[in-house]
Amino acid sequence: MIQGGDPNSRNAPAGQMLGAGGLPYRIPAEFDTSFFHKKGALAAARDNNPEKASSSCQFYIVQGKPRTLAEIVQLERQRNNPYSAAQKALYQSLGGTPHLDLNYTVFGEVIQGLEVLDNIAAMATGPNDRPVQDVAMKITYEVLPRTKISKLYGYQYPTP
């Protein structure tokens, strides 16, 4: 995965550890089994707080790797979190990080440009898994109705 949103990352010297910055509050966790950690999922980072509350500003985008059906079934049993056939198929073909499901809040999804995610994730990293060459992310968003997203990008929403 790639992570961003640490306010301390602006102009941070090379090699400085990042990931601990934020505002003085957390956002309550929101878990919905229809939002899961497939490749391209946009999720809220967090520390190890017992409520699993999210960071006020840090986020990550899942890259992950394809999973075997056996891995997925084992996680279902361990966590009592059954996956739909469509979710299993996506974890097997597209990949992701299913062990994070119901532990971190997923709130969005990359629906175009996953190759950019792969390019960033392939960059050389130094200490603390930070890229040797900084990657500036400019995040923009637009709230669109599902019908417009489907029309523009051909995205098909999973059935609940």
Image: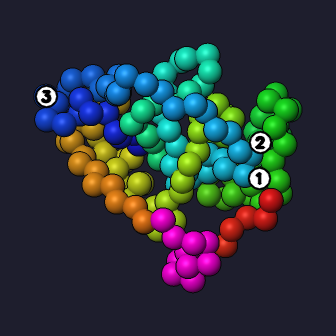
Which residue type carries mark 1? Lys
Quick one: 109 or 15, which is closer to the camera? Answer: 109
**Drawn side of residue 140 relative to residue 36, left or right:** left
Q: Quadrant of the C terminus?
A: bottom right
Mark 3 or mark 2, earlier in chain: 3
Q: Which residue is mark 1?
A: 88
Q: Which residue is mark 2?
A: 72
Residue at position x 44%, y 40% from top? 59
Quick one: 78 or 153, which is closer to the camera? Answer: 153
Count residues near mark 1 (Cα–Cα under 10 Å), then give few for <14, some for 14-19, many for 20+: many
The residue range painted magenta reads: 143-153
Residue at position x 35%, y 40% from top? 4
Q: Which residue is mark 3?
A: 13
Residue at position x 56%, y 48% from top? 107
Q: Secondary structure at mark 2?
A: helix
In the rendered image, residue 146, in percent from the top left (x then y), is placed at 61, 72
**Drawn side of residue 67 relative to residue 122, left or right:** right
